[in-house]
Image (cartoon, coloured by chain):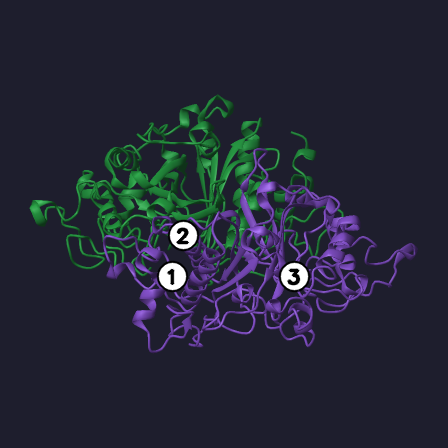
Chain colours: A purple, B green
Amino acid sequence: MTDDAKPGLSRRGLFGLAGAGVVGAGIGFGVDRVLTPEASTSGAAGVYPFFGENQAGIVTPAQDRLHFASFDVSDISRNELQELLEDWSYAANRMTSGLGAGEFGPADGPYDSPPDDTGEALDLPPAGLTITFGFGPGLFDERFGLGGKRPEALIDLPHFPGDALIDGLVGGDLCIQACSDDPQIAVHAIRNLSRIAFGRAKLRWSQLGFGRTSSTTRAQVTPRNLFGFKDGTANLRAEDTNVGKEIWAQNGDGPAWMTGGSYLVSRKIRMTIETWDRTSLREQERVIGRNKGEGAPLSGGTEFTEPDFAVTGRADAPLIDETAHVRLAHPETNSGATMLRRGYNFVDGNDDLGRLNAGLFFICFQRDPRTQFVPVQLSLARNDAMNEYVRHVGSGIFAVPPGATSDRPIGAGLFG
Amino acid sequence: MTDDAKPGLSRRGLFGLAGAGVVGAGIGFGVDRVLTPEASTSGAAGVYPFFGENQAGIVTPAQDRLHFASFDVSDISRNELQELLEDWSYAANRMTSGLGAGEFGPADGPYDSPPDDTGEALDLPPAGLTITFGFGPGLFDERFGLGGKRPEALIDLPHFPGDALIDGLVGGDLCIQACSDDPQIAVHAIRNLSRIAFGRAKLRWSQLGFGRTSSTTRAQVTPRNLFGFKDGTANLRAEDTNVGKEIWAQNGDGPAWMTGGSYLVSRKIRMTIETWDRTSLREQERVIGRNKGEGAPLSGGTEFTEPDFAVTGRADAPLIDETAHVRLAHPETNSGATMLRRGYNFVDGNDDLGRLNAGLFFICFQRDPRTQFVPVQLSLARNDAMNEYVRHVGSGIFAVPPGATSDRPIGAGLFG
């Protein structure tokens, strides 16, 4: 592609210039590309290193806000794809460290070029920003010669009973999950990464999430989803001894380039909240299998008491209904299958009938969706009492490669 | 209307029951309606009283997040409209105080009825929640016998040059502005007020805003809009000595029921940020009339230096361009006209071309839009250099009545 197609970045030789400025300190990406040396090691509050064995934004304590984006790669070469991932890694490392996306702050010009950062985060701390990249099945078609690199675990998701998917909300060649406690920071990250991708990849769909619906560490209070119930009480957490083997692809699982990576499944789940809001409390609690106030399982106890699916009440009916969400989603019902959930509440305005377009943007991470998300979702899609109140309208699956290091950008293993 | 059309609230006689429970303490709305006595006087951090001479959410320090909703009133009677405003006042007073929308928390419920609060804010503080109600021109047609009450200042907005309004994003009989530092709290408020309105009014359009773009007190740092520039540096603030006479309808201005009220104009302004992002820093600063880094006027000084529109540079060209936004929006250029701005950044996903559907949801308050918003916007619409990068797609004007008190719900003056 010509330089004109990537205005503002390649014109000034982004990595080349950055390398010139910090040549003694940086570690090269190939010959002339470096990541900024001041980045990722500060340990300052609200800064999570971009570099590491695994990508951040997975076991990182779930931040409050989300901007998620899926991209289609344009008609570019394999080398240009590799450069895009380098440019993204460079900018992601800067932004998660609290810097602008590019080397040149707007205050310093050059005045006759566009600024290398859009500016809306100039005065703000990163607020726990993490930027997590993933590769969709489409990246492994014939375009980039990557067919042989596709992990078997990166399946095409099956059709689930009741799916009401909308074409424009499904799939994508690349994804970026930006999470921060400040939504302006998450938006700034996606906006600048989209800008950097101009001419090379374009937004397919995107989603803002205003409130986390999962905790990923024991220290976090369980949040509530838009059904008004606590969500993710039984979620896998960073402290769990089995978390590593449940979410990280291990040596021998598949291609070596994915070792230390994970698999992300996203589902945009619209809730028909107006119907839900006219449903009795008894029915709401039957559907979930927990009480609404405290989040305790209907078999008794408090929020963190393990549900007892065998306990029965009147007429020998189980206290936790046979079709309750908590029963069907529980590892005990799914041969022990578990995953790390990291979803967000969303409201996208309202429809023509005056109903809020609201729901849950579900995200989960796992070692292998074939034995984790897929069987659980098949069971839920068939029997979950909650299906009356939800509709899956969007879907995505992405291989999340291991973390970048100062000399290996995201996805470097794909091109080795 | 029948009780069945207002499930969950009128079935249990919301105000009647609340009155019964607190009969010694409450002050009646008419015979059997009261606002909860524990509300609105706590002074706790993050609680702004709902009751007062003026409505909250105007000079209140601008909170970080917004959920704004416009409603069409259904085919109901004048009495039912009055009841809706009473029900909304009751719930708004509770929610701004940190209580649920209704008297019955789900944990205590009658289990066979829907809960009177949807639950997603159960564990959260109000985080500065304000709920501000307004009446659109449509409320003053023949339906409710309110034609004679319409203030002359509640004009139908003129067509502005360049307007690209979308039908579904314009107007409305009623509006609610919910602001909070926690978006889940703002969403909870609009969701519950919509639920309470079921069968009586339905959502016409609604808007989430993730980041404030204005300061309304001197203590607040100037935030940035999605052009990356500081916004609202010259905004009217609560501390300004003239703020009262600029924003509150005064005795003799119009109908007595509006004294202490204000007029709200909203504009959904989509920014073509992809075009903006490819524009040179020089052009960006010329358009705004301030520098991007600090927000100082191009005539010199620092952020809060008054712009000097007469200063010229090379070839006697003014340092602040003749078409710069800061010049055209400045009171000096508009016969002293000013207003209190309270807008928010928004991102509503992306369009089919992969462009972020992003921009500024502009809100302003004033004593009389005929001498404040309208002439300023006419001048901007004709000449503002920024027009190349923005498109006004939504619009609304609402009379914001004075505040409620414990015995007068919002809009009581309309029905006197």
At x 61%, y 67%, the residue is: A258
Q: Is residue B1 left or right of residue B84?
A: right
Asked if disc 3 and disc 1 are in contact, CB closer than 8 Å, the reply is no
Q: Which chain carries label 1?
A: A
Position above or below: B59 against B400: below
* Outermost residue toward the top in this view: B142
* Residue on which the image places disc 2: A195
Disc nearer the start of the sequence (1/2)? 1
Q: Which amino acid does the dot numbered 1 rest on?
A: Ala
Dividing the image into 4 quarters, which one contains the N terminus of chain B?
Answer: top right
Disc nearer the start of the sequence (2/3)? 3
Crowding at label 3, few (<14), some or many (≥20) Cα neighbours within 10 Å?
Answer: some
- Using the numbered discs, state the Cα–Cα distance from disc 1 to disc 2 in whole angstroms: 10 Å
Give percent across and percent down for residue A365: 64, 63
Asked if disc 1 and disc 2 are in contact, CB closer than 8 Å, the reply is yes
Of marks 3 and 1, the one in the foreground: 3
Disc nearer the start of the sequence (3/1)? 1
Q: Mark 2 lies on which chain?
A: A
* Outermost residue toward the right in this view: A315
Crowding at label 1, few (<14), some or many (≥20) Cα neighbours within 10 Å?
Answer: many
Q: Which amino acid does the dot numbered 2 rest on?
A: Arg
* Residue on which the image places disc 1: A101
* Residue on which the image places disc 3: A151
Give percent across and percent down for residue B204: 52, 34
Give percent across and percent down for residue B228: 33, 53
Q: In this view, does B16 lie to the left or right of A144?
A: right
Q: Which of A226 and A181 is in front in this view?
A: A181
**What element does badge 2 sit on?**
helix
